[in-house]
Image (tube, rainbow, N blue to C red):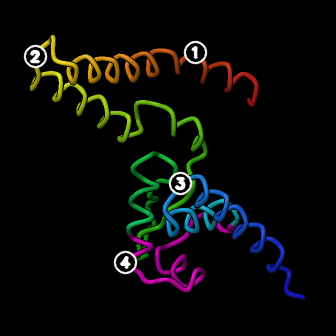
Amino acid sequence: MNDRYEPWQAAERLALTLIEGGMQRMTARTLAVFLFTDQESVTAGEIAAQLEASAGSVSGAIKSLATVGLIERLPAPGSRREHYRLREDAWATLFTSQNTVIQAMLQAAAAGMAATDEGDPAHVRLAQMHAFYEFLLGELPALLSRWHQQSG
């Protein structure tokens, strides 16, 4: 039996769990590649070949994973292809202000509040949304510090 068969089956099971949790299928499968690869970095072409997927779908998945801070682009001197890897601090970054989705939620809530009157129920809901994300970002540094102490 192929030495890579068992790990790849585990990778596909992980991807299925992520899909069932709401992640897009190709994003989940691409994340599984990053988690299970034995290479320092991978290219979109290598991911597409591994998953037998189109370059476009892999490109979209890479963009999604980079947007939330799970992966990063690496310099690859001498290579014409972009190289990516799972960030060393991927899981912590997922919950920080480096996550552009959290920043977008804050900005969207602020824009919605600016477009509605203070007494409007929509304004109240948007203010709660904004307050939640501000609170979350304010609490995360201490939580992540404890995480780094525990894992370091």
Q: Which residue is mark 1?
A: 142
Left or right of 26? Residue 21 is right
Q: Which residue is mark 3?
A: 22
As for residue 67 lying within the magenta part, the answer is: no
Please name which of the two marks, 4 or 1, marks the residue nearer to the observer.
4
Q: Which residue is mark 2?
A: 117
As for residue 49 lying within the magenta part, the answer is: yes
Query: Quarter holding the C terminus?
Result: top right
Q: Earlier in the sequence, mark 4 or mark 3?
A: 3
Q: Earlier in the sequence, mark 2 or mark 4?
A: 4
Given the image, on which type of amino acid does mark 3 rest? Gly
Q: CA distance from mark 3 to mark 1?
A: 28 Å
User: Could you say where residue 3 lies in the image, as x and y percent from the top left?
Assistant: 85, 80
Left or right of 146? Residue 60 is left
| Magenta stretch, residue numbers | 37-59
Given the image, on which type of amino acid does mark 4 rest? Gly
Given the image, on which type of amino acid does mark 2 rest? Asp
Q: CA distance from mark 2 to mark 4?
A: 42 Å
Given the image, on which type of amino acid does mark 1 rest? Ala
Q: Earlier in the sequence, mark 4 or mark 1?
A: 4
User: Could you say where residue 9 lies in the image, as x and y percent from the top left?
Assistant: 77, 73
Q: Is residue 67 above or below residue 82?
A: above
The residue depicted at 58 percent of the width and 15 percent of the height is: 142
Q: CA distance from mark 4 to mark 1?
A: 39 Å
Q: Which residue is mark 4?
A: 56
Please name which of the two marks, 4 or 3, marks the residue nearer to the observer.
3
Q: Residues within 10 Å of mark 1 (few under 14, many from 20)?
A: few
**Foreground: 42 or 111?**
111
Left or right of 148? Residue 73 is left
Q: Earlier in the sequence, mark 3 or mark 2?
A: 3
